[in-house]
Each structure stands twice: as C-alpha cells, then as structure tokens.
Image (cartoon, grey):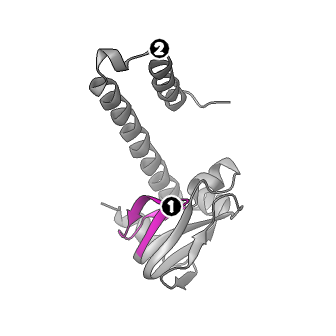
C-alpha cells in the first residue's frame, strides 16, 4: 500500500503520458529522472525477459540509477496508456522527504525479498547439489546484500 503523504506530495510534479510500447527507461542509458506511476501499467524487462509487472499507483522507476549515478539495469516499457509523475532524480529525493522515505522502503522490501529468496535456494538444494562453487556463489550474493559491493 502506498502512503497517502507520498502520493499527496506528487501533485506539484509534471505529469507525462505514454502509450503502450513506449520505453520510459532504457537499460544502459543514463536517465537522471524518476518516474512515479500515476495510472496505467508497465513491465520491467531484461532483454526480452519480463522481470516485473507494475500497475499500482506510486510504483517508482529509475530510483536506483539516480541513487547510484548509473544507467538503468533494465528497460521499463509501458503496457497500456499510462501517466507518470516525473522528477529530476536527486533534487526530487532531497526536497521531498516523503518520496525519499518511500524509495527507502521500496529498496528495503527488495532487500528482504532477496534474502528470503536466497534462503529458499539454500533450503531446496539437495546435499549433492550443494557443491562448493554453487554454495560460494549463493553466499557471495547474500553477503553483497548485507554490505555494498565495491
């Protein structure tokens, strides 16, 4: 559930409309903007593989690229006519406390989900599947979630 204070604070931002098939963020291309879904739906793609589908108002896209000064790690493509609040990334997060808190909560949920998923992978591995290389790889990913990799 998106917090009302976050959504209320977006009313002063510019709104942009996109059509199905439009790509609002491209993997590898710097954007410097944050897109917050007002209405519609998008899919997050790595190549042709769908990573996620989002249609909840308040869903945020481009925040990792803004926070890390890196281009997006995936494409974000509109799947139906959609409107977004659009903001210059870092300025938006500095000025709008509720937005920064909302983004922090999103990232915390992703981190917790990644840990749960890694625990599930460990649990499902049979003893013969727990070879050293796989075990070390899962542990390395888990450690990178606890402390940022260099």
How crowded is the residue under tag 2: few (<14 C-alpha within 10 Å), some, or many (20+)? few
User: Circle 1 is placed at which residue position?
Assistant: 45
Question: Looking at the picture, how far across and down is residue 63, in whole percent?
Answer: 57, 56
Q: Is 77 displayed left or right of 2 in the figure? A: right
Q: Earlier in the sequence, mark 2 or mark 1?
A: 1
> Per the image, is 19 magenta?
no
Question: Looking at the picture, how far across and down is residue 40, in whole percent?
Answer: 40, 78
Observer-nearest residue: 63 or 124?
124
Which image quarter: residue 148? top right
Q: The N terminus lies in which quarter of the figure?
A: bottom left
User: For the point 36% across and 70% down, which residue is it?
Assistant: 55
Indicate the secondary structure of the residue bearing disc 1.
Answer: strand
Q: Tell me which segment is drawn in magenta.
A: 41-61
User: Circle 2 is placed at which residue position?
Assistant: 132
Question: Looking at the picture, how far across and down is residue 98, in whole percent?
Answer: 47, 58
User: For the point 63% across and 65% down, which residue is it?
Assistant: 26
The answer to whether marks 2 and 1 mark residues whose Cβ atoms lie closer than 8 Å is no
Q: The C terminus lies in which quarter of the figure?
A: top right
Q: Is 14 displayed left or right of 136 in the figure? A: right
């Amino acid at each position: 559930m998106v917090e009302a204070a976050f959504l209320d604070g977006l009313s002063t931002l510019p709104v942009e409309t996109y059509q199905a098939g439009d790509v609002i963020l491209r993997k590898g291309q710097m954007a410097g903007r944050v897109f917050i879904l007002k209405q519609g739906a998008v899919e997050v793609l790595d190549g042709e593989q769908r990573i996620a589908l989002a249609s909840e108002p308040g869903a945020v896209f481009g925040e990792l690229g803004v926070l890390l000064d890196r281009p997006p790690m995936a494409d974000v493509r509109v799947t139906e006519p959609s409107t977004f609040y659009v903001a210059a990334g870092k300025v938006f997060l500095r000025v709008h406390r509720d937005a920064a808190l909302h983004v922090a909560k999103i990232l915390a949920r992703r981190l917790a989900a990644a840990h749960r998923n890694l625990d599930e992978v460990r649990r499902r591995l049979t003893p013969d599947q727990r070879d050293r290389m796989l075990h070390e790889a899962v542990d390395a990913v888990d450690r990178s979630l606890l402390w940022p990799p260099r």
